[in-house]
Every structure is written in C-alpha cells, then in structure tokens.
Image (cartoon, rainbow, N blue to C red):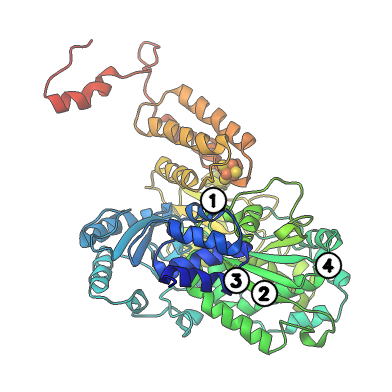
Amino acid sequence: MASDLEKTVRDVCQRYGNDRTRMMDIVTDVQRVHGHVSGEAMDLIAAAVGTARVEVESVVTFYAFLTSRPKGKVIIRLCNDVIDRMKGADRVEKAFEEALGIRAGETTPDGVISLERTPCIGMCDQAPAAVINEVVVTSLSTDKAREIVARLKMGVPPKRLILEYGDGANAHDLVRAEVKNNIRRAGPVVLADYVAGSGLRKALAMSPVEVIREMKASRLRGRGGAGFPLGMKWEFTRNAAGSRKYLVCNADEGEPGTFKDRVILTERPHLLFEGMTVGGYAIGADSGILYLRAEYTYLRAWLEQILAERRDRGLLGRNIMGKAGFDFDIRIQMGAGAYVCGEETSLLSSCEGTRGDPKNRPPFPAQKGYLGAPTAVNNVETLCCVARIMEKGAGWFAEMGSEVSSGTKLLSVSGDCSAPGVYELPFGVTLAELLVLVGAPDAQAVQMAGPSGQLLARGDFGRKICFDDLATGGSVMVFGPDRDLLEIVDGFLEFFIEESCGYCTPCRVGNVLLREGLGRIRAGHGTPDDLTYLKSLAESVKTLSRCGLGQTSPNPVLTALRSFRPVFEQRLVALKDGLLPTFDLKAAVSTAEGITGRQSAHH
Ligand code: SF4
C-alpha cells in the first residue's frame, strides 16, 4: 500500500503534469503537506518527473523557504534587514527567543514553532516585521512578539493572529492582511484609478508593431533600475527566431528597502495584468508568467482571483476582446526566498524549475530565455506604465518627467523619516525635495537604489532622481544624524554574503573579505592601508563577479568611502612612531588572560 508521502508526491506531480520544469511548485506543495522535503520525497519526485535526485535536492537546498529537514509547523521568519534593525528588530528577536525558549535558528522541543531570521520581506515602511508561515505581521514591538507567541502556544493558527486589517485591498476577504499600503503620494500613471480593458482595447486596435512604436514614442524605460528602453526590448523579442515566445513579469522585489510592487500588486493588479497582456500581443507571446516572491504569498489568492475575473471578462484567454487569433494567459510562479532571483536570468532558471543560478549573457533572454524561447522579462511598474500609455497615449506620458526619463517613478521610502511609504513622483525630482516630502529634514545620508546602489551624503541631496543622475529601482533608505554608517554598510555586506549563490569566487569570498576588512576598522584596529585594501578589493569583486549581484555588492563600501571617508578615518588606529600596529599582542592575549586569571609575560 502506498504511504502518505507516496500519495502526496504522486498527486502533486500529476497536478503539474509530471513536468520537471515545474519543480518549484512540486517541492513547495510537497513541503506544504509534509513540512519538509525529505530525502525519500526527493527520490520519489525525481522518479515521477524523470530526473536525477540531485536535481531535486539542488532546488530544495538553494531556496531559503524550502527545507530538507523537519522544522516547526509554524515558522516565524523575522526580518533582520538594516531598516528593521534600526526600528528594533534585535529587541523583538530577543522577545521572541525568551517567549519561545529557543534561539533564532532553532525549533521548540515540541517541534511546533521555529524562529528564523530572514532578509527583507518588503515591509520596511512598517518595520519590524515578520512572516509567520504565510501571514505577515508588522510594526512589531516586544509586547506584540510575546502576545503572538502566547496565542500560537494556545493553538491559534497564524491566519487568526491578525486582529485588524490594513487599508484598501489588504482588507479583502482573499487577503486579510494587517499590511498597510502607506500610499503617500499617488501619481497619474501607476497609482491613479484604472478601468480594466481601457488600455488593452486601444492596443488591440493597433498592430503589434504599432504598439511597439507607441512604446518607443513614450520613451518608456525599464523601472527595475537598469533602464533599458522597453520598446527596443520588445522589438528584439518579437524579431527573435522562435515559434513560441514568453512574457515574464519580475515581481521578486527583494532589494532591501523596496516595497512598491507589494502596493501595486495589492491595489493595481488589473493595470499590471493588462500591461502583461499588451506585452504578449506586442511580442507575439501566448503565455505570461508572474514570478511572485514567496514573501508575498499572502497576495496569491487575490491575484489568482483577478486573473479568473479577467478570463471571465474576455481580457485573458482565447480571442481576447474579440481579437481573432490573439490568445494569451498568465500563470503565477511562486519564488521561494532567493534575492538573486531578482536578476532576470536567475529568475528564468527558477521558472524552469532549477536553482536560481544566473546564466551567461549573451544570449540575452530576448533571444533565448524561458525554456530556450525568446522572452521579454519586465518589471511590475514598467508593465503598469505600458497599460497606462496605451490608455492615455505616448505623448501624454512622454511629457512627464525629465528629458531622458519620461513618466513617473514609484519610490519606496523607509528609515529615519516621519512619513515612510510609497511616493509616485515625476522623474527629475531632487532628493532634497523628496526628503522634505517624507519628513527627513536632518538626514545625514540616503541609501539610494538599495544596498546595490549608493550611499549619498548631504552634498548629493540636490541631485535629481532620474536615469541620467540618481537611477533607482525605487528603494530610498534614510539615515538620521545619529546612525552609525559603518554599521549600516556592514549590514548590507552581511546581506550580500547571505544571498550570494556561491557560483563564483570573487563574490563568494570577496564579500566575506570586505566585511572582515570593514570589521577591523569598526573594531578600531584598522590602518590607512586598510582603506586602500578595501577599495581595491571592492573594485576587484565588481569587475570579476559573474552576475549583477557580485558586480554591485561592493557598492556600499565604495560609495561610503567616497561620500563618508572621514567616518572611516576617525576609526583608524593612530600610528605610533611611524610604525604600523599590525598586530596588537596585548589585545590578542587578553581573552586568554581573562580565562586563566594570569597575566602573560610580554613586552
Ligand atoms: Fe552567484 Fe555572486 Fe557569482 Fe552572481 S556574482 S553568480 S550571485 S556568486
């Protein structure tokens, strides 16, 4: 007789057509039933989909939200990014630990509750926050942490921990989240009201080539940070050889400090799906994939319902809006907790059911992407702009913003400011103007574009937010005058070390060495040579790393050295008689002296 595990694996694999490219869904579903994906489960899955066990295991061990070992039925994943720590995540962690009687990384002896740390979960505007199974809890205090543990111990399921719902669709029956949108400034492009079908109708009245021409006329550039012209990307994809093409939306915003996609997915899903549909029409694709980060699983049922509604209304499916021969549908692919999957080729690897390893480029996804077919990978905000451009016209859009950056930009603002949240502003706004809006008159520094961006000092605040000056995917972290900037840089390096996929040595080892070098300076053991070493090591890591993660991970060090060199210099050891204190013998033996209770004989 088949065991429970055998039945689960058989049912789950059949649900996905025994298709090994759906490995992410298969292992996630098996884990949902059995709590983990055991070695036995891996063998069964491998046999069912016709692959090697190692292929299954490499997926299960790569993603933070998957596990091959049993964990608690309830997993508390407490966000420990820089902003959450600034807002008290360390105190909250201690409260969780005390109430549970375990340390972070452990499971209670009864096997019920695990406590883990996790990098950014997209809630920096309401930090500290955590994900408990799939339920997000925000604005945590030590009292709230203790209360949560007390209720979990009483057997209250995570879903019932939420006592008050957030605003807008957060209160919808299919979401029921305490998350707040914190929309502080709604602009005319992404956050304005939208009537489903209005942009798509106009697109379908044109030819696909005319739609691409409209995108070019609007001068729309990708909102993910790189700013590649959208019309050109679609043209490459459309013209690439291949009978089947795909459109993939990257909703894996994992850059610490970014949370605008969360708000779009909650409040403007029609706008997004409509942009994807227009994209499918323009490039000649019949399938779209929304790659949704695991931290946003709480939005999945809501998004599936919007997709179902669009199918019912003829906005997805066959002969869309009566356009004979235009068939397009969208499926949601869940991620499983890997920052590197925000990089488009890693994301495609993940969609194909493997580890989120980056791929060599060329070929670019437009030539050879998902399952080897030409694929346009676009950002959530970019696709929303597409639908709005179709509704209002390229000219209307191009008139907004600055000369080379048309339209608006959504900014996720967090940190030391009185009004954290989402701001939709025209490109060209200065950082100083933004800081007034968000209530941060005394900011000493701003981290622009997340940890992979740049740390800016007051001298940079007059600069403009746009592609030709301060380019950003949307993350803006504000640091007040009392923050220790080296501690913040250290936090960013810790994040990159954790998220490196480990494929190439410069990134895997270089970031660790950078952190050690910074640690020497923070501990008061650094010399002027350490600054030279840090700079040259950081440049090597940037130059020699294989993908965008390693190529940008040293930016916190380099930009902090550029903007805040005196902060480093203040921590350096003063030279004595022109000699470098390369080894502090007294400090080195002090621990041993403390343990033995004796003084060493040294001079
Ligand atoms: Fe992996 Fe880092 Fe190399 Fe990218 S740069 S392939 S994340 S090790």
Which residue carries the number 4 mark? Answer: 212
- Say which element carries label 4: helix
Q: In the image, is the residue at mark 1 within 8 Å of ligand 1 by its beta carbon?
A: no
Q: Earlier in the sequence, mark 3 or mark 4?
A: 3
Whereabouts is ligand 1, in terms of quadrant? Answer: top right
Q: Residues within 10 Å of mark 2 (few under 14, many from 20)?
A: many
Amino acid at the residue labelled 3: Tyr
How far across and down, in percent of the image, does residue 238 sit?
A: 83, 63
Which residue is the extreme one toward the left?
597
Q: Is residue 114 visible?
A: yes
- The numbered mark at residue 330 is 2
Which residue carries the number 1 mark? Answer: 54
Q: Is residue 129 left or right of residue 363?
A: left
- Say which element carries label 2: strand
The residue sitting at 78% across, 70% down in the picture is 285
- Say which element carries label 1: helix
Amino acid at the residue labelled 2: Ile
Q: In the image, is the residue at mark 4 within 8 Å of ligand 1 by its beta carbon?
A: no
Measured Cα–Cα span from mark 4 to mark 1: 43 Å
How far across and down, in percent of the image, does residue 45 sit?
A: 53, 62
Q: Earlier in the sequence, mark 4 or mark 2?
A: 4
The residue sitting at 26% across, 23% down in the picture is 587
Figure check: 249 above or below 557: below
Measured Cα–Cα span from mark 3 to mark 4: 34 Å
- The numbered mark at residue 16 is 3
Measured Cα–Cα span from mark 3 to mark 2: 16 Å
How far across and down, in percent of the image, does residue 532 sit?
A: 52, 25
Asked if the residue under mark 2 is in contact with the one under mark 3, i.e. CB atoms within 8 Å, the reply is no
Q: Looking at the image, which is closer to me, 88 or 234?
A: 234
Question: Which one is closest to the eye, mark 4 or mark 2?
Answer: 2
Question: Which one is closest to the eye, mark 1 or mark 2?
Answer: 1
Q: Looking at the image, which is closer to me, 600 or 416?
A: 600
